[in-house]
Amino acid sequence: GAVVSQHPSWVICKSGTSVKIECRSLDFQATTMFWYRQFPKQSLMLMATSNEGSKATYEQGVEKDKFLINHASLTLSTLTVTSAHPEDSSFYICSARGRMRREKGNEQFFGPGTRLTVL
Amino acid sequence: KQEVTQIPAALSVPEGENLVLNCSFTDSAIYNLQWFRQDPGKGLTSLLLIQSSQREQTSGRLNASLDKSSGRSTLYIAASQPGDSATYLCAVSGGANSKLTFGKGITLSVRP
């Protein structure tokens, strides 16, 4: 299957700082990337959807000024958590979907996740 | 609004047992359904994807079935092994460019 990487895999930061998380599709062109967050023992919550070259679409209740998403190329999307606070501590996972391929039915491929801890 | 339910939330079985994990969804107008595996602290690994026009997909010891009209999917795991211990999530998509709606997952523990 297609490979999606995330960097860093974990990060610890002080309250008030900003943190950038990268998501890369390594062997395919990702026309759409998704950002999720996951709390312990909970399922994934979609935060936003980004299409290459256009602004991200945020889910209801997600602050777009706090969670900045950039999808400048077909292989890279970034999520920046601005002025992070302890309540932003979570597991952030990205996924990527490539150009329509009938045999794959527009399958989504997920990154390994980034554990963010805000002190 | 699509809702995906996975019951039970947790399951413990002895090694070697064949098992079935269930997933149900409220809106039968889906585009496809995916089953994922998630190990603790890790991302998701796609196991199987079933198109809305398909009835089942198989990969090794895994078989996923889809009954769209009744809003159900099952993931069958044959001859379970301790390495199968993980959380299994199902997710449905409403269209080619739609987002995935996830269930809360089933945490499986296979005892040696």
Image: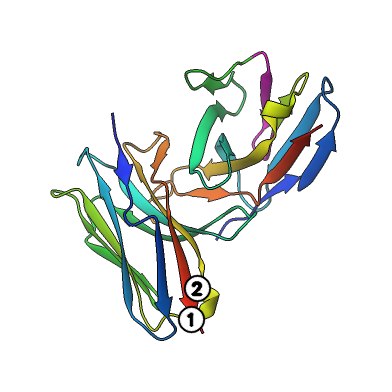
Residue B27's place in the image compared with B83, above or below, is above
Q: Residue at x 60, y 29 (%)?
A: A52
- Closer-to-camera residue (B14/A76): B14
**Does the magenta portion include A109?**
no
Residue B54's place in the image compared with A31, above or below, is below
Mark yes or no: residue B9 visible. Answer: yes
> Observer-nearest residue: B53 or B21?
B21
Q: Amino acid under label 1?
A: Gln
C-alpha span from label 1 to label 2 = 5 Å
Expressed as whole percent of the image width and height from the top left, the position of residue B112 reads: 51, 85
SS assignment at label 1: loop
| Nearer to us in this view, B36 or A96 | B36
- Kind of residue indicated by mark 2: Asp
Q: Can you tell which mark lies on residue B84?
A: 2
The magenta-colored residue range is A65-77
**Residue A15: quadrant of the picture:** top right
Residue B81, disc: 1
Magenta span dominant secondary structure: strand
Question: What residue is at 42 percent from the left and 35 percent from the top?
Answer: B99
Q: Kindly give the residue lying farthest to the left in the view shown.
A: B69
